[in-house]
Amino acid sequence: MFYEVELRDIVRVPPTELKGDIKKMIEEILKTSFIGNVGKEYGMIITINEIKEISEGIVIPEDGGVYYKVTFKAITFVPLINELVYGIITSIAEFGAFASIGPVDALIHISQIMDDEVSISGREALQGRNTKKVLKVNDIVKARVVTVSYKDIVNLKVSLTMKQPGLGKLEWLESKDVKVEKKETKTTKKK
């Protein structure tokens, strides 16, 4: 899920950059410092949206830079546990698949792909032993977020499952809908 959040920070503008537009320089520093960073309280910062307030600068002796208290708005990505997401499979590995869910590639462990024994079929596909269902790169999937890890400041880790009813590769879900409709039609004709 994407959110707009308000954040505050103290920004140091180096003495070499004091001759230009201070607001633009602070915005560039914020973008360099924050975009891509991850925090439990705000998720992953995607972009700086707006600078709301810049305090008067403070000079610290023997530093040369000027420090500003800045309030700004940022767009963040915060995956929530149990949230339903759509993703595109970006890669296949021995242990599962990775799906792009916006700015993050989330892991779908091999045990969470389907209710069937899954094996690697070729270099870029996983296949169910009994169902013969195939999951490959560029497939679109519907999944549920099961874990989110904020351990690393620049690396948000998300795990997904597709084993629950109503989840999986979109083609698999569409074929289930067709079968249900056919059964209902047959039942209706018998009456």
Image (cartoon, rainbow, N blue to C red):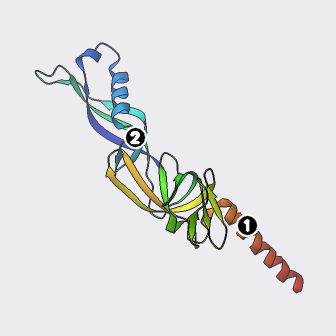
Which percent across, then down, holds residue 126?
59, 61
Quick check: can you spot residue 186? yes
Callout 1 crowding tier (Cα within 10 Å): few <14, some 14–19, many ≥20: few
Residue that numbered label 2 is attached to: 36
In the depicted structure, whether residue 6 falls above or below residue 13 = below
In the depicted structure, whether residue 60 falls above or below residue 179 = above
Residue under the image location 41 percent in, 54 percent down: 157
Which percent across, then down, holds residue 37?
36, 42
Helix, strand or loop at mark 1? helix
Residue under the image location 33 percent in, 14 percent down: 20
Which percent across, then down, holds residue 153?
32, 46
Q: Quadrant of the C terminus?
A: bottom right
Q: What's the amino acid at mark 2?
A: Gly
Q: Give the residue furthest to the bottom.
A: 191
Residue that numbered label 1 is attached to: 175
Residue under the image location 44 percent in, 56 percent down: 158
Work out whether residue 104 or residue 78 is closer to the camera in this orientation and state it: 104
Q: What's the amino acid at mark 1?
A: Ser
Work out whether residue 70 or residue 100 is closer to the camera in this orientation and state it: 100
In the depicted structure, whether residue 11 falls above or below residue 80 = above
Circle number at residue 94: none
Q: Would you identify the image quadrant in which residue 127 lies?
A: bottom right
Observer-side mark, 2 or 1, equals: 1
Q: Would you identify the image quadrant in which residue 171 lies?
A: bottom right
Q: Earlier in the sequence, mark 2 or mark 1?
A: 2
